[in-house]
Image (cartoon, rainbow, N blue to C red):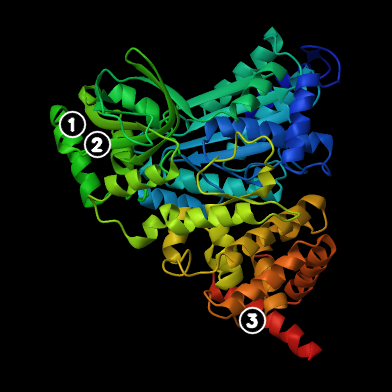
Amino acid sequence: MAVQFQSLYVKAQVHCSINYGIQGSMMDKITGSLLSTFVKQNELSTNELSTQFEHFVNYAITSKVFRGSFELDDVHVGSGGDCAIDGLCIIVNGRLITDEDVLKDVVDNSGYLDADITFVQSKTSSNFDGSSIGSFIHGVKDFLSDAPQLVQNTAIKKMKYVWELIVQMSDHMVNRRPNCRLFYVSTGKWVGDDNLVAIINSGKKEIDQLSLFDAVSVDALGATELQRMYQETKNRLSVTVNFQNRITLPDIEGVAEAYLGVIPFDEYVKLIQDESGTIYSIFDDNVRDFQGGNVVNAKIKNTLDQGKFDLFCVLNNGVTVVAGSLTPAGNRFTIRDYQVVNGCQTSHVLHECRKIEGIEKVYVPMKIIVTDDEDIKTNITLATNSQTEVRTEQLEALSSFQKKLELYYAAEKNTIQLYYERRSQQYNSFGDVKRTQIISIPTQIKSFASMFLNSPHLVSGYYGTIVKRFSGKIFNEDHKYSAYYVSGLAYYRIEQMFRSGELDSGYKKFRFQFMLIVRMLVIGEALDYFNSNAFDKACERLKSILLDDDKSAELFKQAQTVFDNSKLDKTKRQYKAESDTDLVIEAFRTQKASKA
Protein backbone atom coordinates (compact mmCIF):
# COMPACT_ATOMS: atom_id res chain seq x y z
CA MET A 1 0.00 0.00 0.00
CA ALA A 2 2.78 2.43 0.87
CA VAL A 3 4.40 1.74 -2.50
CA GLN A 4 1.11 2.60 -4.24
CA PHE A 5 0.83 5.84 -2.26
CA GLN A 6 4.34 6.80 -3.23
CA SER A 7 3.91 5.90 -6.91
CA LEU A 8 0.85 8.13 -7.26
CA TYR A 9 2.43 11.00 -5.38
CA VAL A 10 5.61 10.82 -7.50
CA LYS A 11 3.52 10.87 -10.68
CA ALA A 12 1.78 14.00 -9.45
CA GLN A 13 5.06 15.66 -8.50
CA VAL A 14 6.46 15.06 -11.98
CA HIS A 15 3.79 17.42 -13.24
CA CYS A 16 3.79 19.81 -10.30
CA SER A 17 5.16 22.68 -12.34
CA ILE A 18 2.81 22.11 -15.30
CA ASN A 19 -0.71 23.50 -15.42
CA TYR A 20 -3.24 22.22 -17.90
CA GLY A 21 -6.43 23.80 -19.20
CA ILE A 22 -7.15 27.45 -19.80
CA GLN A 23 -4.44 29.66 -18.37
CA GLY A 24 -5.22 32.54 -16.08
CA SER A 25 -6.53 33.06 -12.59
CA MET A 26 -9.70 35.11 -13.15
CA MET A 27 -13.06 33.42 -12.53
CA ASP A 28 -15.40 33.71 -15.54
CA LYS A 29 -18.35 36.10 -15.21
CA ILE A 30 -21.06 33.44 -15.11
CA THR A 31 -19.42 31.39 -12.36
CA GLY A 32 -18.61 34.59 -10.50
CA SER A 33 -22.22 35.73 -10.71
CA LEU A 34 -23.57 32.38 -9.50
CA LEU A 35 -21.05 32.37 -6.66
CA SER A 36 -22.03 35.90 -5.68
CA THR A 37 -25.70 34.90 -5.50
CA PHE A 38 -24.84 31.80 -3.50
CA VAL A 39 -22.72 33.79 -1.02
CA LYS A 40 -25.58 36.24 -0.49
CA GLN A 41 -28.18 33.50 0.00
CA ASN A 42 -25.96 31.70 2.51
CA GLU A 43 -24.57 34.79 4.28
CA LEU A 44 -20.95 33.88 3.59
CA SER A 45 -19.64 37.38 2.82
CA THR A 46 -17.21 37.34 5.75
CA ASN A 47 -15.51 34.17 4.47
CA GLU A 48 -12.49 34.26 2.21
CA LEU A 49 -13.10 33.69 -1.50
CA SER A 50 -11.53 30.22 -1.40
CA THR A 51 -13.87 29.15 1.43
CA GLN A 52 -16.89 30.63 -0.33
CA PHE A 53 -16.00 28.67 -3.44
CA GLU A 54 -15.53 25.46 -1.44
CA HIS A 55 -19.05 25.81 -0.01
CA PHE A 56 -20.41 26.62 -3.47
CA VAL A 57 -18.87 23.52 -5.04
CA ASN A 58 -19.78 21.29 -2.09
CA TYR A 59 -23.39 22.43 -2.29
CA ALA A 60 -23.66 21.82 -6.03
CA ILE A 61 -22.12 18.35 -5.88
CA THR A 62 -23.84 17.20 -2.68
CA SER A 63 -27.19 18.30 -4.11
CA LYS A 64 -26.52 16.02 -7.06
CA VAL A 65 -25.91 12.93 -4.92
CA PHE A 66 -28.44 13.75 -2.19
CA ARG A 67 -31.97 15.07 -2.80
CA GLY A 68 -32.70 16.24 0.75
CA SER A 69 -31.97 19.41 2.70
CA PHE A 70 -28.62 19.81 4.44
CA GLU A 71 -26.43 22.45 6.03
CA LEU A 72 -23.21 23.56 4.38
CA ASP A 73 -21.15 22.62 7.42
CA ASP A 74 -22.51 19.07 7.20
CA VAL A 75 -20.20 18.44 4.23
CA HIS A 76 -17.45 21.09 4.50
CA VAL A 77 -14.14 19.81 5.86
CA GLY A 78 -11.73 22.26 4.24
CA SER A 79 -9.25 24.01 6.60
CA GLY A 80 -5.88 23.15 8.01
CA GLY A 81 -5.36 19.39 8.20
CA ASP A 82 -7.99 18.65 5.57
CA CYS A 83 -5.91 16.05 3.67
CA ALA A 84 -6.45 18.11 0.48
CA ILE A 85 -10.20 17.42 0.81
CA ASP A 86 -12.65 20.33 0.87
CA GLY A 87 -15.93 18.44 0.89
CA LEU A 88 -16.90 15.00 2.18
CA CYS A 89 -20.36 13.51 2.29
CA ILE A 90 -21.53 10.03 3.21
CA ILE A 91 -24.96 8.82 2.07
CA VAL A 92 -26.48 5.69 3.61
CA ASN A 93 -29.83 4.37 2.39
CA GLY A 94 -30.59 7.74 0.82
CA ARG A 95 -29.86 9.70 4.02
CA LEU A 96 -27.02 12.15 4.61
CA ILE A 97 -24.97 10.83 7.53
CA THR A 98 -23.57 13.52 9.81
CA ASP A 99 -22.59 11.43 12.84
CA GLU A 100 -22.63 7.91 14.19
CA ASP A 101 -26.05 8.31 15.82
CA VAL A 102 -27.69 9.08 12.48
CA LEU A 103 -25.86 6.13 10.91
CA LYS A 104 -26.99 3.66 13.55
CA ASP A 105 -30.58 4.89 13.49
CA VAL A 106 -30.83 4.67 9.69
CA VAL A 107 -29.31 1.19 9.48
CA ASP A 108 -31.35 -0.11 12.42
CA ASN A 109 -34.56 1.14 10.80
CA SER A 110 -33.70 -0.23 7.36
CA GLY A 111 -31.94 -3.48 8.20
CA TYR A 112 -29.48 -2.99 5.34
CA LEU A 113 -26.68 -0.59 4.41
CA ASP A 114 -26.21 0.99 0.96
CA ALA A 115 -23.38 3.50 1.33
CA ASP A 116 -21.83 6.10 -0.96
CA ILE A 117 -18.91 8.33 -0.04
CA THR A 118 -18.08 11.46 -2.01
CA PHE A 119 -14.89 13.54 -1.82
CA VAL A 120 -14.52 17.03 -3.26
CA GLN A 121 -11.54 19.29 -3.93
CA SER A 122 -12.17 22.76 -5.37
CA LYS A 123 -9.80 25.39 -6.75
CA THR A 124 -10.68 28.96 -7.72
CA SER A 125 -7.80 28.85 -10.19
CA SER A 126 -8.73 28.29 -13.84
CA ASN A 127 -5.83 25.84 -14.15
CA PHE A 128 -6.00 22.07 -13.74
CA ASP A 129 -2.87 21.32 -11.77
CA GLY A 130 -1.35 17.84 -11.78
CA SER A 131 0.21 18.25 -8.36
CA SER A 132 -3.08 19.35 -6.77
CA ILE A 133 -5.01 16.48 -8.36
CA GLY A 134 -2.38 14.02 -7.16
CA SER A 135 -2.44 15.47 -3.64
CA PHE A 136 -6.24 15.20 -3.60
CA ILE A 137 -6.21 11.54 -4.59
CA HIS A 138 -3.37 10.86 -2.15
CA GLY A 139 -5.42 12.51 0.63
CA VAL A 140 -8.45 10.37 -0.17
CA LYS A 141 -6.37 7.20 -0.11
CA ASP A 142 -4.85 8.21 3.20
CA PHE A 143 -8.37 8.83 4.60
CA LEU A 144 -9.46 5.35 3.47
CA SER A 145 -6.36 3.60 4.80
CA ASP A 146 -6.28 1.63 8.04
CA ALA A 147 -3.47 3.81 9.40
CA PRO A 148 -3.73 7.39 8.08
CA GLN A 149 -0.47 9.32 8.02
CA LEU A 150 -1.68 12.83 7.18
CA VAL A 151 -2.73 15.31 9.84
CA GLN A 152 -6.53 15.35 10.16
CA ASN A 153 -8.64 18.26 11.38
CA THR A 154 -11.70 17.77 13.59
CA ALA A 155 -14.15 17.50 10.69
CA ILE A 156 -12.03 14.90 8.88
CA LYS A 157 -11.61 12.88 12.09
CA LYS A 158 -15.37 12.93 12.67
CA MET A 159 -16.13 11.60 9.19
CA LYS A 160 -13.30 9.07 9.41
CA TYR A 161 -14.89 7.69 12.58
CA VAL A 162 -18.25 7.39 10.79
CA TRP A 163 -16.60 5.71 7.80
CA GLU A 164 -14.88 3.15 10.01
CA LEU A 165 -18.24 2.33 11.60
CA ILE A 166 -19.68 1.75 8.14
CA VAL A 167 -16.85 -0.64 7.30
CA GLN A 168 -17.44 -2.47 10.59
CA MET A 169 -21.13 -2.83 9.67
CA SER A 170 -20.31 -4.56 6.39
CA ASP A 171 -22.54 -7.51 7.30
CA HIS A 172 -25.48 -5.16 6.59
CA MET A 173 -24.25 -4.55 3.02
CA VAL A 174 -26.61 -7.17 1.62
CA ASN A 175 -27.19 -5.32 -1.67
CA ARG A 176 -23.77 -4.01 -2.61
CA ARG A 177 -20.50 -2.62 -1.38
CA PRO A 178 -20.15 1.18 -1.14
CA ASN A 179 -19.52 3.46 -4.11
CA CYS A 180 -16.74 6.05 -4.04
CA ARG A 181 -16.83 9.31 -5.99
CA LEU A 182 -14.09 11.92 -6.29
CA PHE A 183 -14.69 15.36 -7.81
CA TYR A 184 -11.85 17.77 -8.58
CA VAL A 185 -13.29 21.15 -9.56
CA SER A 186 -11.60 24.16 -11.15
CA THR A 187 -12.99 27.34 -12.72
CA GLY A 188 -11.26 26.59 -16.03
CA LYS A 189 -12.15 24.25 -18.88
CA TRP A 190 -11.40 20.55 -18.66
CA VAL A 191 -9.88 19.40 -21.95
CA GLY A 192 -8.87 15.87 -20.99
CA ASP A 193 -5.11 16.43 -21.05
CA ASP A 194 -3.37 13.06 -21.41
CA ASN A 195 -1.02 13.64 -18.48
CA LEU A 196 -3.82 14.58 -16.11
CA VAL A 197 -5.99 11.72 -17.32
CA ALA A 198 -3.08 9.37 -16.58
CA ILE A 199 -2.83 10.69 -13.00
CA ILE A 200 -6.59 10.33 -12.52
CA ASN A 201 -6.71 6.81 -13.96
CA SER A 202 -3.77 5.72 -11.84
CA GLY A 203 -5.41 7.10 -8.71
CA LYS A 204 -8.74 5.51 -9.56
CA LYS A 205 -7.05 2.15 -10.04
CA GLU A 206 -5.22 2.36 -6.72
CA ILE A 207 -8.43 3.27 -4.82
CA ASP A 208 -10.22 0.41 -6.56
CA GLN A 209 -7.45 -1.97 -5.44
CA LEU A 210 -8.39 -1.27 -1.82
CA SER A 211 -11.28 -3.72 -2.46
CA LEU A 212 -13.70 -1.53 -0.49
CA PHE A 213 -15.97 -0.40 -3.29
CA ASP A 214 -18.32 -1.67 -5.95
CA ALA A 215 -17.47 1.31 -8.11
CA VAL A 216 -14.93 4.14 -8.05
CA SER A 217 -15.13 7.31 -10.16
CA VAL A 218 -12.80 10.29 -10.37
CA ASP A 219 -14.15 13.31 -12.26
CA ALA A 220 -12.46 16.58 -13.16
CA LEU A 221 -15.02 19.36 -13.63
CA GLY A 222 -14.60 22.80 -15.12
CA ALA A 223 -16.70 25.95 -14.98
CA THR A 224 -19.29 24.71 -17.49
CA GLU A 225 -20.00 21.49 -15.55
CA LEU A 226 -20.09 23.37 -12.23
CA GLN A 227 -22.52 25.96 -13.55
CA ARG A 228 -24.84 23.23 -14.82
CA MET A 229 -24.71 21.37 -11.51
CA TYR A 230 -25.53 24.49 -9.53
CA GLN A 231 -28.42 25.43 -11.81
CA GLU A 232 -29.81 21.90 -11.38
CA THR A 233 -30.09 22.48 -7.61
CA LYS A 234 -32.92 24.92 -8.36
CA ASN A 235 -34.88 22.30 -10.29
CA ARG A 236 -37.34 20.02 -8.59
CA LEU A 237 -36.82 16.25 -8.80
CA SER A 238 -37.85 15.02 -12.26
CA VAL A 239 -37.92 11.61 -13.91
CA THR A 240 -39.38 10.08 -17.07
CA VAL A 241 -40.99 6.64 -16.93
CA ASN A 242 -42.98 4.40 -19.26
CA PHE A 243 -46.48 4.07 -17.77
CA GLN A 244 -48.31 2.11 -20.45
CA ASN A 245 -50.77 0.03 -18.45
CA ARG A 246 -52.96 2.74 -16.96
CA ILE A 247 -56.38 4.35 -16.97
CA THR A 248 -57.20 8.03 -16.56
CA LEU A 249 -59.30 8.76 -13.48
CA PRO A 250 -62.38 11.03 -13.79
CA ASP A 251 -62.10 14.77 -13.16
CA ILE A 252 -61.51 15.58 -9.52
CA GLU A 253 -61.81 19.08 -8.06
CA GLY A 254 -58.38 20.41 -7.10
CA VAL A 255 -56.57 17.66 -9.04
CA ALA A 256 -55.05 18.51 -12.42
CA GLU A 257 -54.92 14.88 -13.54
CA ALA A 258 -54.77 11.40 -12.05
CA TYR A 259 -53.90 7.92 -13.32
CA LEU A 260 -54.21 4.38 -12.00
CA GLY A 261 -52.39 1.32 -13.32
CA VAL A 262 -49.40 -0.97 -13.01
CA ILE A 263 -45.82 -0.11 -13.90
CA PRO A 264 -42.93 -2.52 -14.62
CA PHE A 265 -40.30 -2.85 -11.91
CA ASP A 266 -37.54 -1.46 -14.13
CA GLU A 267 -39.59 1.70 -14.70
CA TYR A 268 -40.69 2.09 -11.09
CA VAL A 269 -37.16 2.02 -9.67
CA LYS A 270 -36.37 5.09 -11.79
CA LEU A 271 -38.75 6.95 -9.50
CA ILE A 272 -37.09 5.89 -6.26
CA GLN A 273 -33.35 5.62 -6.90
CA ASP A 274 -30.58 7.38 -8.77
CA GLU A 275 -28.26 6.00 -11.42
CA SER A 276 -25.92 4.54 -8.79
CA GLY A 277 -28.74 2.64 -7.08
CA THR A 278 -29.05 4.97 -4.08
CA ILE A 279 -32.63 5.44 -2.93
CA TYR A 280 -33.98 8.99 -3.11
CA SER A 281 -35.21 10.93 -0.11
CA ILE A 282 -38.72 11.21 -1.56
CA PHE A 283 -40.73 9.88 1.36
CA ASP A 284 -40.88 13.10 3.41
CA ASP A 285 -44.65 13.26 3.10
CA ASN A 286 -45.09 9.61 4.11
CA VAL A 287 -46.58 9.18 7.58
CA ARG A 288 -44.37 6.17 8.26
CA ASP A 289 -40.64 5.99 7.92
CA PHE A 290 -39.29 2.68 6.60
CA GLN A 291 -39.98 0.08 9.27
CA GLY A 292 -37.23 -2.38 8.33
CA GLY A 293 -37.88 -6.08 8.76
CA ASN A 294 -41.36 -5.90 10.28
CA VAL A 295 -44.03 -8.51 9.53
CA VAL A 296 -45.52 -6.67 6.53
CA ASN A 297 -42.16 -6.00 4.91
CA ALA A 298 -41.03 -9.57 5.57
CA LYS A 299 -44.10 -10.83 3.68
CA ILE A 300 -43.38 -8.53 0.73
CA LYS A 301 -39.78 -9.70 0.61
CA ASN A 302 -40.80 -13.34 0.98
CA THR A 303 -43.07 -13.04 -2.07
CA LEU A 304 -40.11 -11.80 -4.10
CA ASP A 305 -37.62 -14.28 -2.66
CA GLN A 306 -39.93 -17.13 -3.66
CA GLY A 307 -40.09 -15.84 -7.22
CA LYS A 308 -43.84 -15.13 -7.10
CA PHE A 309 -43.36 -12.11 -9.31
CA ASP A 310 -46.70 -12.42 -11.10
CA LEU A 311 -48.57 -12.37 -7.77
CA PHE A 312 -46.91 -9.20 -6.51
CA CYS A 313 -49.34 -6.77 -8.15
CA VAL A 314 -52.39 -8.51 -6.65
CA LEU A 315 -50.92 -9.05 -3.18
CA ASN A 316 -49.54 -5.52 -2.78
CA ASN A 317 -51.65 -2.43 -2.14
CA GLY A 318 -49.34 -0.44 -4.38
CA VAL A 319 -47.89 3.04 -4.19
CA THR A 320 -49.32 6.52 -4.48
CA VAL A 321 -47.25 9.28 -6.07
CA VAL A 322 -48.27 12.92 -5.69
CA ALA A 323 -46.61 15.24 -8.20
CA GLY A 324 -46.47 18.96 -8.82
CA SER A 325 -46.64 18.55 -12.59
CA LEU A 326 -46.69 15.85 -15.25
CA THR A 327 -45.91 15.98 -18.98
CA PRO A 328 -47.17 13.00 -21.00
CA ALA A 329 -45.72 12.03 -24.37
CA GLY A 330 -47.58 8.91 -25.40
CA ASN A 331 -46.76 6.37 -22.71
CA ARG A 332 -43.72 8.35 -21.52
CA PHE A 333 -44.58 10.38 -18.42
CA THR A 334 -42.20 13.06 -17.15
CA ILE A 335 -43.07 13.53 -13.48
CA ARG A 336 -41.75 16.57 -11.60
CA ASP A 337 -41.62 17.61 -7.95
CA TYR A 338 -43.03 14.35 -6.70
CA GLN A 339 -43.27 12.42 -3.45
CA VAL A 340 -44.18 8.80 -2.73
CA VAL A 341 -46.86 9.48 -0.11
CA ASN A 342 -47.89 5.86 0.29
CA GLY A 343 -45.61 2.95 -0.53
CA CYS A 344 -42.51 3.77 1.50
CA GLN A 345 -42.32 0.18 2.75
CA THR A 346 -42.95 -1.32 -0.70
CA SER A 347 -40.38 0.98 -2.30
CA HIS A 348 -37.64 0.12 0.16
CA VAL A 349 -38.25 -3.62 -0.11
CA LEU A 350 -38.24 -3.43 -3.93
CA HIS A 351 -35.01 -1.45 -3.74
CA GLU A 352 -33.51 -4.04 -1.40
CA CYS A 353 -34.55 -6.89 -3.73
CA ARG A 354 -33.58 -5.22 -7.00
CA LYS A 355 -30.86 -7.78 -7.78
CA ILE A 356 -33.04 -10.87 -7.40
CA GLU A 357 -33.06 -12.81 -10.65
CA GLY A 358 -36.36 -12.31 -12.46
CA ILE A 359 -37.34 -9.17 -10.50
CA GLU A 360 -37.97 -7.40 -13.82
CA LYS A 361 -41.16 -9.50 -14.12
CA VAL A 362 -42.72 -7.61 -11.20
CA TYR A 363 -45.46 -5.07 -11.89
CA VAL A 364 -46.11 -2.44 -9.22
CA PRO A 365 -49.64 -1.07 -8.73
CA MET A 366 -49.33 2.72 -8.92
CA LYS A 367 -51.52 5.78 -8.65
CA ILE A 368 -50.25 9.17 -9.84
CA ILE A 369 -52.06 12.30 -8.69
CA VAL A 370 -51.05 15.75 -9.92
CA THR A 371 -52.03 18.61 -7.61
CA ASP A 372 -50.64 21.74 -5.98
CA ASP A 373 -53.32 21.79 -3.30
CA GLU A 374 -51.62 21.09 0.05
CA ASP A 375 -54.87 20.04 1.73
CA ILE A 376 -55.55 17.49 -0.99
CA LYS A 377 -51.99 16.16 -0.68
CA THR A 378 -52.44 15.72 3.06
CA ASN A 379 -55.83 14.04 2.71
CA ILE A 380 -54.47 11.65 0.07
CA THR A 381 -51.55 10.73 2.28
CA LEU A 382 -53.67 10.11 5.35
CA ALA A 383 -56.30 8.14 3.42
CA THR A 384 -53.87 5.91 1.54
CA ASN A 385 -51.98 5.13 4.73
CA SER A 386 -55.06 4.22 6.76
CA GLN A 387 -54.82 0.53 5.88
CA THR A 388 -51.94 0.00 8.33
CA GLU A 389 -51.80 1.15 11.93
CA VAL A 390 -50.10 4.54 12.09
CA ARG A 391 -48.90 5.85 15.42
CA THR A 392 -49.73 9.41 16.42
CA GLU A 393 -46.15 10.64 16.36
CA GLN A 394 -45.83 9.52 12.74
CA LEU A 395 -48.57 11.93 11.68
CA GLU A 396 -46.75 15.00 12.98
CA ALA A 397 -45.17 16.04 9.68
CA LEU A 398 -48.65 16.22 8.14
CA SER A 399 -50.66 17.58 11.04
CA SER A 400 -52.58 20.82 10.95
CA PHE A 401 -50.11 22.11 13.54
CA GLN A 402 -47.31 21.84 11.00
CA LYS A 403 -49.24 23.78 8.38
CA LYS A 404 -50.28 26.43 10.89
CA LEU A 405 -46.70 26.72 12.12
CA GLU A 406 -45.54 27.36 8.57
CA LEU A 407 -48.12 30.13 8.30
CA TYR A 408 -47.06 31.52 11.67
CA TYR A 409 -43.46 31.81 10.44
CA ALA A 410 -44.66 33.55 7.28
CA ALA A 411 -46.78 35.99 9.31
CA GLU A 412 -43.83 37.07 11.46
CA LYS A 413 -42.85 40.14 9.44
CA ASN A 414 -39.75 41.08 11.40
CA THR A 415 -36.33 42.46 10.54
CA ILE A 416 -35.33 38.80 10.21
CA GLN A 417 -37.63 36.75 7.98
CA LEU A 418 -37.56 33.01 8.62
CA TYR A 419 -39.21 30.26 6.56
CA TYR A 420 -40.48 26.98 7.97
CA GLU A 421 -39.69 24.07 5.64
CA ARG A 422 -42.34 21.37 5.99
CA ARG A 423 -41.07 19.57 2.89
CA SER A 424 -37.46 18.91 1.97
CA GLN A 425 -36.06 21.49 -0.49
CA GLN A 426 -39.38 23.35 -0.42
CA TYR A 427 -37.72 26.70 -1.06
CA ASN A 428 -34.97 25.67 -3.47
CA SER A 429 -36.56 27.44 -6.40
CA PHE A 430 -37.22 30.66 -4.43
CA GLY A 431 -34.35 32.94 -5.43
CA ASP A 432 -35.14 35.57 -2.80
CA VAL A 433 -35.03 33.16 0.15
CA LYS A 434 -31.67 32.82 1.87
CA ARG A 435 -30.83 29.26 2.83
CA THR A 436 -29.81 30.49 6.27
CA GLN A 437 -33.37 31.71 6.83
CA ILE A 438 -34.88 28.25 6.37
CA ILE A 439 -35.80 26.22 9.45
CA SER A 440 -36.37 22.56 8.60
CA ILE A 441 -38.47 20.15 10.66
CA PRO A 442 -35.38 18.39 12.12
CA THR A 443 -33.87 21.76 13.07
CA GLN A 444 -37.17 22.85 14.61
CA ILE A 445 -37.42 19.69 16.69
CA LYS A 446 -33.84 19.94 17.92
CA SER A 447 -34.14 23.65 18.73
CA PHE A 448 -37.46 23.38 20.57
CA ALA A 449 -36.43 20.26 22.49
CA SER A 450 -33.13 21.82 23.53
CA MET A 451 -34.55 25.17 24.61
CA PHE A 452 -37.90 24.23 26.13
CA LEU A 453 -37.63 20.52 26.99
CA ASN A 454 -34.15 20.85 28.55
CA SER A 455 -32.92 18.09 26.24
CA PRO A 456 -29.88 19.12 24.17
CA HIS A 457 -28.45 15.69 25.01
CA LEU A 458 -31.29 13.95 23.15
CA VAL A 459 -31.23 15.73 19.80
CA SER A 460 -28.58 13.67 18.02
CA GLY A 461 -29.48 10.96 15.55
CA TYR A 462 -31.86 10.57 12.63
CA TYR A 463 -34.93 12.80 12.48
CA GLY A 464 -37.44 9.93 12.66
CA THR A 465 -35.87 8.59 15.84
CA ILE A 466 -35.78 12.03 17.47
CA VAL A 467 -39.49 12.49 16.75
CA LYS A 468 -40.26 9.27 18.60
CA ARG A 469 -38.21 10.38 21.62
CA PHE A 470 -40.40 13.44 22.08
CA SER A 471 -43.73 11.87 21.21
CA GLY A 472 -46.52 13.81 22.89
CA LYS A 473 -44.19 16.62 23.98
CA ILE A 474 -43.81 18.47 20.72
CA PHE A 475 -46.16 19.77 18.00
CA ASN A 476 -49.19 19.53 20.27
CA GLU A 477 -52.25 21.31 18.93
CA ASP A 478 -52.63 23.47 22.05
CA HIS A 479 -49.00 24.64 22.13
CA LYS A 480 -48.24 28.29 21.49
CA TYR A 481 -46.48 28.75 18.15
CA SER A 482 -44.25 31.49 19.55
CA ALA A 483 -42.01 28.98 21.34
CA TYR A 484 -41.32 27.14 18.09
CA TYR A 485 -40.64 30.35 16.22
CA VAL A 486 -38.36 31.77 18.90
CA SER A 487 -36.35 28.54 19.07
CA GLY A 488 -35.93 28.68 15.29
CA LEU A 489 -34.87 32.31 15.61
CA ALA A 490 -32.33 31.40 18.30
CA TYR A 491 -30.90 28.74 16.00
CA TYR A 492 -30.62 31.27 13.17
CA ARG A 493 -28.88 33.75 15.47
CA ILE A 494 -26.27 31.36 16.86
CA GLU A 495 -25.47 30.02 13.38
CA GLN A 496 -25.11 33.62 12.20
CA MET A 497 -22.62 34.29 14.99
CA PHE A 498 -20.58 31.25 14.02
CA ARG A 499 -20.51 32.44 10.40
CA SER A 500 -19.44 35.96 11.38
CA GLY A 501 -16.81 34.79 13.84
CA GLU A 502 -18.52 36.43 16.83
CA LEU A 503 -18.61 32.96 18.37
CA ASP A 504 -15.65 30.66 17.96
CA SER A 505 -16.54 27.72 15.71
CA GLY A 506 -15.09 25.42 18.35
CA TYR A 507 -18.32 25.95 20.30
CA LYS A 508 -20.49 24.76 17.43
CA LYS A 509 -20.99 21.27 18.81
CA PHE A 510 -22.43 22.93 21.94
CA ARG A 511 -24.91 25.17 20.10
CA PHE A 512 -27.97 23.44 21.54
CA GLN A 513 -26.57 23.75 25.07
CA PHE A 514 -26.03 27.47 24.37
CA MET A 515 -29.63 27.80 23.25
CA LEU A 516 -30.87 26.23 26.49
CA ILE A 517 -28.79 28.72 28.49
CA VAL A 518 -30.15 31.61 26.42
CA ARG A 519 -33.70 30.59 27.26
CA MET A 520 -32.90 30.30 30.98
CA LEU A 521 -31.14 33.68 31.03
CA VAL A 522 -34.21 35.47 29.65
CA ILE A 523 -37.21 33.39 30.73
CA GLY A 524 -35.79 31.54 33.72
CA GLU A 525 -35.40 27.89 34.57
CA ALA A 526 -39.07 27.27 35.40
CA LEU A 527 -41.57 27.43 32.53
CA ASP A 528 -45.30 28.04 32.42
CA TYR A 529 -47.57 25.63 30.57
CA PHE A 530 -46.87 25.68 26.84
CA ASN A 531 -50.49 26.64 26.10
CA SER A 532 -50.60 29.55 28.54
CA ASN A 533 -50.61 33.24 27.77
CA ALA A 534 -47.86 33.77 30.34
CA PHE A 535 -45.61 31.40 28.40
CA ASP A 536 -46.50 33.15 25.15
CA LYS A 537 -45.51 36.52 26.65
CA ALA A 538 -42.21 35.11 27.91
CA CYS A 539 -41.40 33.85 24.40
CA GLU A 540 -42.27 37.25 22.95
CA ARG A 541 -39.84 38.84 25.41
CA LEU A 542 -37.07 36.53 24.25
CA LYS A 543 -37.99 37.18 20.62
CA SER A 544 -37.60 40.94 21.03
CA ILE A 545 -34.04 40.42 22.29
CA LEU A 546 -33.10 37.98 19.54
CA LEU A 547 -34.36 40.39 16.87
CA ASP A 548 -32.00 43.09 18.14
CA ASP A 549 -28.47 42.57 16.75
CA ASP A 550 -26.61 44.03 19.74
CA LYS A 551 -28.82 42.55 22.46
CA SER A 552 -28.78 39.15 20.77
CA ALA A 553 -24.99 39.13 20.51
CA GLU A 554 -24.65 40.14 24.15
CA LEU A 555 -27.09 37.41 25.22
CA PHE A 556 -25.10 34.67 23.50
CA LYS A 557 -21.88 36.04 24.97
CA GLN A 558 -23.47 35.72 28.42
CA ALA A 559 -24.44 32.16 27.52
CA GLN A 560 -20.83 31.47 26.57
CA THR A 561 -19.67 32.67 29.98
CA VAL A 562 -22.14 30.38 31.74
CA PHE A 563 -21.11 27.47 29.55
CA ASP A 564 -17.39 28.11 30.11
CA ASN A 565 -18.00 28.03 33.86
CA SER A 566 -19.81 24.70 33.70
CA LYS A 567 -18.04 21.54 34.76
CA LEU A 568 -18.94 19.83 31.50
CA ASP A 569 -15.99 17.98 29.97
CA LYS A 570 -15.43 20.05 26.83
CA THR A 571 -13.18 17.41 25.25
CA LYS A 572 -15.77 14.64 24.90
CA ARG A 573 -16.88 13.60 21.44
CA GLN A 574 -20.56 13.44 22.34
CA TYR A 575 -22.88 14.71 25.06
CA LYS A 576 -25.76 12.25 25.17
CA ALA A 577 -26.29 11.88 28.92
CA GLU A 578 -28.83 13.81 30.97
CA SER A 579 -26.02 14.43 33.45
CA ASP A 580 -24.24 16.48 30.77
CA THR A 581 -27.21 18.83 30.56
CA ASP A 582 -27.49 18.90 34.36
CA LEU A 583 -23.96 20.32 34.54
CA VAL A 584 -24.97 23.16 32.21
CA ILE A 585 -28.10 23.90 34.24
CA GLU A 586 -26.07 23.84 37.44
CA ALA A 587 -23.68 26.42 35.99
CA PHE A 588 -26.67 28.67 35.28
CA ARG A 589 -27.94 28.25 38.84
CA THR A 590 -24.50 29.07 40.24
CA GLN A 591 -24.25 32.28 38.23
CA LYS A 592 -27.78 33.28 39.19
CA ALA A 593 -27.01 32.69 42.87
CA SER A 594 -23.81 34.73 42.67
CA LYS A 595 -25.78 37.72 41.35
CA ALA A 596 -28.56 37.41 43.92
In the picture of the structure, the residue carrying the numbered disc 2 is: 318
Count of numbered labels shown in the rendering: 3
Considering only order in the chain, which callout, 2 or 1, is on the residue closer to the N terminus? 1
- The quadrant in which residue 476 appears is bottom left
* Residue 525: mark: 3
**Which one is nearer the viewer's eye here, 401 or 28?**
401
Residue 370 appears in the figure: yes
Instruction: Look at the picture and state if 122 lies above or below 569.
Output: above
Image coordinates for residue 55, horizontal then vertical, percent: 71, 37
Q: Nearer the viewer, residue 221 or 591?
A: 591
Mark linked to residue 12: none
Look at the picture and state if 235 lies above or below 511: above
Nearest to N terminus: mark 1 or mark 3: 1
Kind of residue indicated by mark 3: Glu
Label 2: few (<14), some (14–19) or many (≥20) C-alpha neighbours in 10 Å: many
> Where in the figure is residue 397, as x and y percent of width and height?
44, 53
Q: Position of residue 580 (x, y in %)?
A: 60, 73
Cα gap from disc 1 to disc 2, whole angstroms: 7 Å
The image quarter in which residue 199 lies: top right
Kindly report the distance in space between the C-alpha atoms of the residues bearing marks 3 and 2.
50 Å
x 76%, y 54%: residue = 415
Whether residue 354 sits left or right of residue 187 in the image: it is: left
* Residue 13 visible in the current orientation: no
Q: Quadrant of residue 175?
A: top left
Quadrant (top left/top right/bottom left/bottom right) for the N terminus: top right
Residue at 82% from the left image edge and 22% from the top image edge? 27
